[in-house]
Image (spheres, helix red, strand yellow):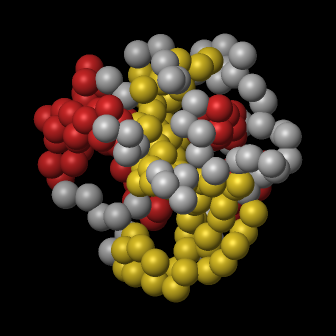
Amino acid sequence: MLLAVDISPTVTLRLVEEADASQLAAAYVRNRQHLAPWEPERPDAYFAADWHEGDIAGLRAAYHAGFTLPLVLAAGDTVIGRVTLSGIVRGAFQSASLGYWIDEQHAGRGLMSAAVNAVLVVARDNLRLHRIEAATLVHNAASQRVLFRAGFEQIGLAPRYLRIAGAWQDHVLFQRILENGPDDIRSLT
């Protein structure tokens, strides 16, 4: 399984660790205004390390049960983003949902595109998934560029899909078929 992948000379994509709680809280505090238009409204407790301690414990349990792949982007000891495959479903579906964000100071440098591509390799080669889905707000052009660069295709529009920034908002739906498709996902080996 993915332990750590260097996606740049200074940034590593790795499994979230219990010791990341204070760094995650600091990242969310630092990016509170940057992320607010793209995420659900958060209670004040969300911005404290003890909230993230509990969340990380739950995420790691779900990871060990095979339901999620919770990752962080780290520049040294500083968490600068997250990438998560959630809702991993086996059986006939073999699918998961992709979510991600990056620190405002690191946006636009290709780091998230590299991270998403690395996760697609793991999803295909290690998790043996068939399909990854993602959704973005209709007006989130930057996130849509990340998905298009990674070979996702737009498959629809979901009206009032998620409650983001305090309102039910429409989302564009995307998918990436991982097997028997374009051979443009770089191997991690």
Residue 167, placed above or below residue 182: below
* Quadrant of the rendered image containing residue 186: top right
At horizontal 46% and vertical 43% (from top left) the residue drawn is: 84
The mark tally for this picture is 0
The answer to whether residue 108 is seen in the rendering is yes
Whole-percent x and y of residue 93?
A: 54, 59
Left or right of 171 in this view: 15: left
Looking at this view, is 47 or 134 the one in front? 134
Residue 164, placed above or below residue 92: below
Question: Quarter holding the C terminus?
Answer: top right
Residue 64, placed above or below residue 141: above
At horizontal 69% and vertical 55% (from top left) the residue drawn is: 176
At horizontal 52% and vertical 18% (from top left) the residue drawn is: 4
Q: Residue furthest bottom?
A: 159
Whole-percent x and y of residue 95?
A: 54, 54
Looking at this view, is 23 or 5 the one in front? 5
* Quadrant of the rendered image containing residue 65: top left
Whole-percent x and y of residue 115?
A: 62, 34
Looking at this view, is 166 or 117 the one in front? 117
